[in-house]
Amino acid sequence: MTPHLEAYLMLSAALFAVGFLGVLIRRNTLVIYMCLELMLVAATLALVAFSRFNGTEDGDVFVFFILTVAAAEVAVGLAIIVALFRARQTVQVDELNSLKH
């Protein structure tokens, strides 16, 4: 017995909601970044679910591109967070609200 499209979409919506709430509630830049990645994974899951439901492989091809871009995004994002930590000695969003040092 295979899960239906609705089950995958409910899981995707739940993952997206958890990520969205994490972005709104948390104040640590690393946690916010992980929540953004969770939202990206949720959208990717929905894309694959729709692709399987329609019987095409188009969604699977897009997932490879999404994962490639996500890997580059992780490298750049973590580099920015490390640079902010080195400059300010904190990763709390409340303390990073000013552009001047």
Image (cartoon, rainbow, N blue to C red):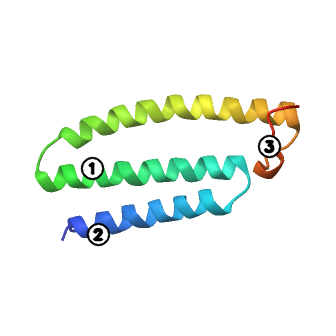
Q: Is residue 87 above or below residue 54?
A: above
What quarter of the picture does the C terminus occupy? Answer: top right
| Residue linked to disc 1 | 48
Which of the numbered marks, if any, corresponds to residue 20? none
Pinpoint residue 48: horizontal percent, then vertical percent. 27, 49
Q: Secondary structure at mark 2?
A: helix
Left or right: 91 as drawn, with respect to 51: right
Kindly identify which residue carries mark 3.
Answer: 96
Work out how far the residue at label 1 is from the one at label 3, CA to CA, in angstroms: 37 Å
Q: Is residue 39 above or below residue 4?
A: above
Whichever of callouts 2 and 3 sits on the residue coming sooner in the sequence is: 2
CA–CA distance in space, label 2 to label 3: 40 Å
Q: Position of residue 11 (x, y in %)?
A: 37, 66
Label 1 sits on what residue type?
A: Val
Mark 2 vs mark 3, foreground winner is: 3
Q: Residues within 10 Å of mark 2 (few under 14, many from 20)?
A: few
How many C-alpha atoms fall within 10 Å of the one at disc 1: few (<14), some, or many (≥20)? many
Q: CA distance from mark 2 to mark 1?
A: 13 Å
Mark 1, secondary structure of its residue? helix
For residue 69, what is the image quadrant? top left
Q: Which residue was labeled with disc 2?
A: 7
